[in-house]
Image: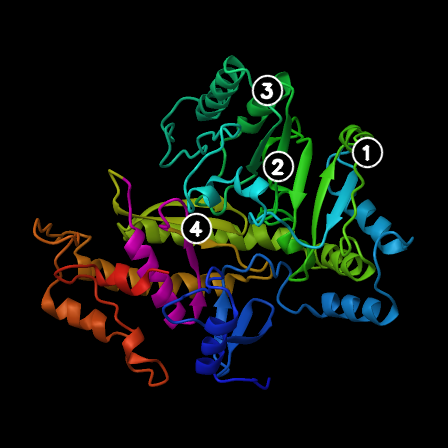
Amino acid sequence: MCELYSKRDTLALRRKHIGPSCKVFFAADPVKIVRAQRQYMFDERGDQYLDCINNVAHVGHCHPEVVKAALEQMEALNTNSRFLHDNIVEYARRLSATLPEKLSVCYFTNSGAYHGHLSSLIEISPYKFRKGKDVKKEFVHVAPAPDTYRGKYREDHADPANAYADEVKEIIEKAHNSGRKIAAFIAESMQSCGGQIIPPAGYFQKVAEYVHRAGGVFIADEVQVGFGRVGKHFWSFQMQGEDFVPDIVTMGKPMGNGHPMACVVTTKEIAEAFSSSGMEYFNTYGGNPVSSAIGLAVLNVIENEDLQGNATRVGDYLTELLNKQKAKHTLIGDIRGIGLFIGIDLVKDRQERTPATDEAQHVIYKMKEKRVLLSADGPHRNVLKIKPPMCFTEEDAKFMVDQLDEILTVLEEAIGAKSESVISENTPCRAKMPNEAHSELLGEGASDPRENPGQKRNGLCTDKHSLLSKRLKT
């Protein structure tokens, strides 16, 4: 594919014309991607990268059936949903069929304000407002994440689901005591940006009970984790059991395999209440014939290629490989996930579970050098996120884990994480490295002449700052 500009010129133009709040992956050394196919992405030099993070390209980058559906419908018609068209109703019917019966009314959008582009959504997203002025509005109440690894109630607790749900109950009681009512409880069915957190079974049922008793509704956010990613179920909230059904489900990202699509699905009763308010809902692009055709194609591919089954098979295999790595590497504190939604929690100390933030940033950059794309997230940005296209194979899983093993081995040797760690009171860095280990890391990867040597500083300690933090902070 022909480039318009060199990578250097592309960066310069981006800095000039794209707002500085719009970030790029691997900011210290961005990747310029010019094409992609299935679970692979290719840069301007033709180098292939294994994509382990792109849950948007759900059925695989540029899937031919999805591309064909878009092209054929674009050639025939694209308009808004105020005109009658079969695609939108057929897609709504097919989508509703994947959900519990009472969730049957769809509101389509062209994308989402999910990421907090509206103040009303920033206000209910701790992930967002804590990055800003950290001002929580008085009408917003933040429940503890149901994290059984690093949270208040851990894996050794007798009943973490009820314990975390009781925290929500207490929040509701405090709100009532201050004269407030409860409108809704919203949570990701599995927390992605929160650190790949899987709620304990039974948590959502108890929370829904308390929220409903208070007059509120339960909103399950499936934007990151829906459409069969967990394998055994089409929707992640279904892992909680058949006795749990949310009142509203939000979805997007994988819905259009890269085409901008999103949707809110709710009950007939809630839809009628919304309509009776007198407010019309209209979205110029939401549910247009092209988007609906693409959405239908994605559903077809998931079914025809048994991608849910693949998520289970490959996910189980990948989890098995990673647990073997956990037994080998002390930097790995926890492996958690289901299907093709897995987190690797990196720690400095397994007993204290101290987040290994700098180390996680180091790992994702080194993985990039080995042509594997990973990201780190969570409150401490120490959890490696694995959420690849659903066509990810066992061979891909083995390749990814092999690269991770090599990187962790070198890293642990350098920082003495296994047995030779030395804590210095005179430096902010956790461990002193032997000079030879320090030199080895600084020189690692230098054999690729196409890389900028100034961007390959991978040492771990200096007198004043950790080179990991300095080099990899994004």
Tell me the residue that label 2 is attached to.
220
Give the CA distance from mark 3 to mark 1: 23 Å
Tag 3 near tag 2, CB within 8 Å: no
Magenta segment boundaries in residue numbering: 353-382
Residue 357 is one of the magenta-drawn residues: yes
Tag 3 near tag 1, CB within 8 Å: no
Q: What kind of element bears circle 2?
A: strand
Instruction: Name above or below for residue 412 compared with residue 341.
Output: below
In the rendered view, does 244 fall on the left or right side of 271?
Answer: left
The residue under the point 84% across, 53% down is 81
Task: Please tell me in which quadrant of the rendered image residue 470 appears.
Answer: bottom left
Tell me the residue that label 1 is attached to.
278
Tell me the residue that label 4 is attached to.
320
- Mark found first going from the N terminus, 4 or 3: 3
Dividing the image into 4 quarters, which one contains the N terminus?
Answer: bottom right
**Residue farthest toward the right in the current orientation of the protein:** 84
Give the CA distance from mark 3 to mark 2: 20 Å
In the rendered view, does 382 fall on the left or right side of 179?
Answer: left
Name the residue nearer the viewer: 170 or 139.
139
**Closer to us: mark 2 or mark 4?**
2
How crowded pointer 1 is (Cα within 10 Å; few <14, some 14-19, many 20+) is rated as few
The residue under the point 72% across, 59% down is 301
Give the CA distance from mark 4 to mark 3: 46 Å
**Closer to us: mark 3 or mark 2?**
3
- Mark found first going from the N terminus, 2 or 1: 2
In the rendered view, does 296 fall on the left or right side of 429?
Answer: right
Q: What kind of element bears circle 3?
A: loop
User: For the residue marked with disc 1, what is the amino acid?
Assistant: Gly
User: For the residue marked with disc 2, what is the amino acid?
Assistant: Ala
Tag 4 near tag 3, CB within 8 Å: no
